[in-house]
Image (cartoon, grey):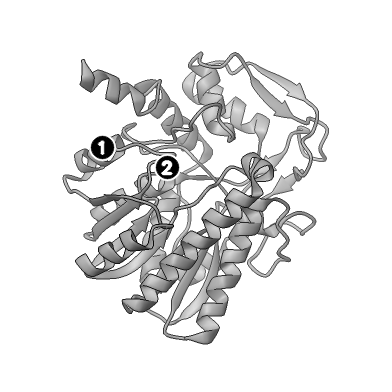
Amino acid sequence: MAILVTGGAGYIGSHTCVELLENGHDVIVIDNLSNSSLDVLDRIHTLTNKKVTFYKGDLLDRTMLETIFTGHSIESVIHFAGLKAVGESVEQPNRYYYTNLMSTLHLLQVMDKYNVHKLVFSSSATVYGTGNLMPLNEEARLSAVNPYGRTKLMIEEMLADHYRSNQAWRFIVLRYFNPIGAHPSGMIGEDPAGRPNNLMPYVTQVAVGKLPELNIFGDDYSTHDGTGVRDYIHVVDLALGHIQALKKTAEPGYHTYNLGTGQGYSVLDVIHTFEEVNGNPVPYRVQGRRSGDAAVCYADVEKAKKELNWEATRGLQDMCRDAWRWQVQNPNGYQKARSFQSN
């Protein structure tokens, strides 16, 4: 029996594939490579000495999905695939709603047809919106403030409705906080297309000289240093959370869990820790606040500790060190490997 990983060549998906293989699972990946690289599959093989079965395709292509489910004995699905840039979702809401919602509907339809009812879904802390008390627990008010977050929230509601209609379904919804870092080998990591949207790849690209400086949006929040505070989690800890979530699918039900550290760090905390750990300066410029940004956001992680027997063990220093190792070894991301192999 195999685990189907949608979007498995992406940042979080690739790290999860490594942990799945290391834990003895057979892994099938479907990915359209719109924001990922085939090179990551070779690196997963190098790290684990095991191969994934790969299909280049899109969940909007139901025929492709049917081919996978008829050709393999699939036990469970981990669903990462989808568009994920907040700013882009504001500019292209129709594309985000169509892609993220329809691809999930196709997946659920095909899973139901082939009697596969175990799904771990990659959700996000963006479903909490703003205005909640900290730390955020799973019962906090849900109110996404951008199209990307709303697609995550809508999918959560779709899964809950599917469970209400058929309690053979076993859904685990994982609400991520802020994944950063990379595999400690430096072989796989975050490889954003174009200018990074997230803090850590922006920091590493400034430190390596690809970008001149980091923009900090707001230094007048009610935090210990005026910059925004977030719950950053090492991507390997996040990947291990999926291993525990798969175990939880042995029980029927619909369950939601926060995956974070339970501790908040400011933007300046991240910059200063990165500089201290790696010895590289990160020049920055303070800009005005961005609309919709909260001052503080961090997780209550007690439910995951209790019910999944999972908690993050890697600290901010580990996240900064591993992110920098990935950047130094891969200054142009996976493109470096492609260029090297072609020479």
Q: Position of residue 35 (x, y in %)?
A: 44, 39
Q: Secondary structure at mark 1?
A: helix
- Residue at the location (28% across, 25% down)? 338
Image quarter (top left, top right, bottom left or bottom right) of the N terminus: bottom left
User: Which of the 4 image quarters holds residue 222?
Assistant: top right
Which residue position holds label 2? 11
Give the residue type that dot 2 points to: Tyr
Nearest to the observer: residue 241 or residue 3 = 3
Instruction: Describe residue 51's horizontal placement relative to residue 302 as left or right.
Output: left
The residue carrying pointer 2 sits among few (fewer than 14), some (14 to 19) or many (20 or more) residues within 10 Å by Cα, namely many
Image quarter (top left, top right, bottom left or bottom right) of the C terminus: top left
Q: Position of residue 296 (x, y in %)?
A: 73, 46
- Residue 102 in the image: above or below residue 53: below
Q: Is residue 25 visible?
A: yes
Mark before the other along the chain sequence, 2 or 1: 2
User: Which of the 4 image quarters holds residue 176?
Assistant: bottom right
How many marks can you see? 2
Q: Position of residue 299 (x, y in %)?
A: 63, 56
- Residue at the location (78% across, 30% down)? 219
User: Which of the 4 image quarters holds residue 65?
Assistant: bottom left
Q: Position of residue 111 (x, y in %)?
A: 37, 72
Q: Secondary structure at mark 2?
A: helix
Nearest to the observer: residue 47 or residue 314 = 47
Which residue position holds label 1? 43
Instruction: Describe residue 281's horizontal placement relative to residue 146 as left or right.
Output: left
Q: Is residue 175 visible?
A: no
* Residues at circles 2 and 1 in contact by the CB criterion of under 8 Å: no
Nearest to the observer: residue 74 or residue 66 = 66
- Residue 201 in the image: above or below residue 280: below
